[in-house]
Amino acid sequence: MVKLLVGLGNPGKKYEKTRHNVGFMVVDEFLKKLRVKDYSEECLSHVYKVRVSGKEVIVAKPQTYMNNSGLAVLNLLEEYDLRPEDMMVVYDDLDLPLGRIKLRLEGSSGGHHGVESIIREIKADNFIRLRVGIGRPKDKNKVVDYVLSPFSEEEEGLLYAVLSRSSECILRCLETSPESSMNFCNAPVVG
């Protein structure tokens, strides 16, 4: 059962609308649906507490910058006495095109530095992941510039559909289970 939802991103206005912050964007959309705005600053994160189907869920946006996300996640797991398998992490994925999300129950980091940091700090990889496709630049030498750039105007309609579907995926996982939500979450998003 998911008791901790973590969206990955970088703090600050400079990064707010960048591709690398799609994890924050998904969590923001989820919180908006639940009409939750108030948060506390703890465990190196902005922490929101929500109730879904009578269960309390901790929602966090680490403020450590992407490559140190594991520091915040370790703090959160320890503070709330949770196990890795109680957690879902939402993050951007270069290997999926915009318009695709993929729910996985565990696995490797796939080269994502935020997920690498989490695995390194908590010494486990058995947590649920919601990978949100952002596509990959044609020039592999421009990955850093690409992930730190905003979505284009042409992509915004599809991005909104992705955020909405991702938020609904999270809600279904919390109301039922990640296993029973796989088909819905992994179907292509139509913008």
Image (tube, helix red, strand yellow):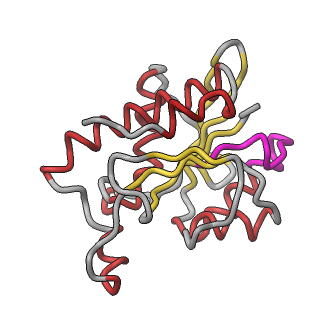
Is the N terminus in the top left, top right, bottom left or bottom right quadrant?
top right
- Residue 33, position as x, y percentages in the image: 43, 22
Q: Which of 75 and 162 is in front in this view?
A: 162
**Which x, y percent locates residue 181?**
60, 29
Reply yes or no: does residue 122 show up in magenta: no
- Left or right side of 130 for 140: left
Q: What stretch is highlighted in magenta?
A: 76-89
> Residue 109: image x %, image y %?
63, 66
In the image, what residue occupies the spot 67% across and 21% down? Answer: 176
- 5 or 131, which lies in front? 131
- For the point 30% across and 81% down, the residue is 142
Count all numbered tags in the image, as a single digit. Answer: 0
- In the rendered view, would you say 15 is above or below 67? above
Along the line of sight, the residue nearer the viewer: 167 or 106: 106
Quadrant of the rendering where the C terminus is positioned? top left
User: Measuring 44% from the left and 64% from the top, which residue is drawn there?
Assistant: 95
